[in-house]
Image (tube, rainbow, N blue to C red):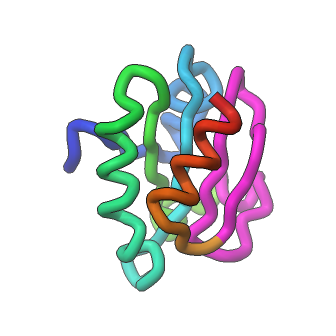
Amino acid sequence: MSENIIYVSDDSFEKDVLQSDKPVLLDFWATWCHPCKMIAPVLEDLGKDYAGRVVIAKMDIDENPQTPAKFGVRSIPTLMLFKGGVVEKTVVGAKSKGELAAFLDALV
């Protein structure tokens, strides 16, 4: 477990994501998803780079089926940026660190 990434469940989603006082980049992923594994180090780096400004969070869709269904997640990895409890933007698929940093910079 990383000090720069939080792990969110269906039960903790409201408190950890919707009620967060900082923007939250939530990664919907699964252990069997190769592209999800590819972006894991990128998210770790972003967690360090944006510490104190953006919360980087992960949710395993197999262990937590309610939240992904509520937000229409059909493909993983899906990354959603929440601000003030609202989805600001969604990105689907593995992206580079530069692409995700630009995505965050445009929205935070």
Residue 19: name its quadrant: top right
Q: Check the image and report above or below for 33 versus 40.
A: below
Front residue of 95 and 19: 95
Magenta residues, as a range?
67-92
| Residue at 73 percent of width and 54 percent of height | 90
Please say whether residue 61 is one of the residues in the magenta stretch.
Answer: no
Front residue of 69 and 95: 95
Please say whether residue 71 is one of the residues in the magenta stretch.
Answer: yes
Q: Check the image and report above or below for 15 versus 99.
A: above
Residue 34: name its quadrant: bottom left
In the image: residue 3, left or right of residue 49 = left
Q: Position of residue 11 (x, y in %)?
A: 52, 39
Q: Check the image and report above or below for 8 versus 73.
A: above
| Residue at 35 percent of width and 37 percent of height | 49
Residue 4: name its quadrant: top left
Q: Check the image and report above or below for 26 versus 92.
A: above
| Residue at 46 percent of width and 23 percent of height | 53
Question: Is the C terminus in the top left, top right, bottom left or bottom right quadrant?
Answer: top right
Q: Position of residue 56 (x, y in %)?
A: 44, 41
Q: Position of residue 42 (x, y in %)?
A: 37, 59
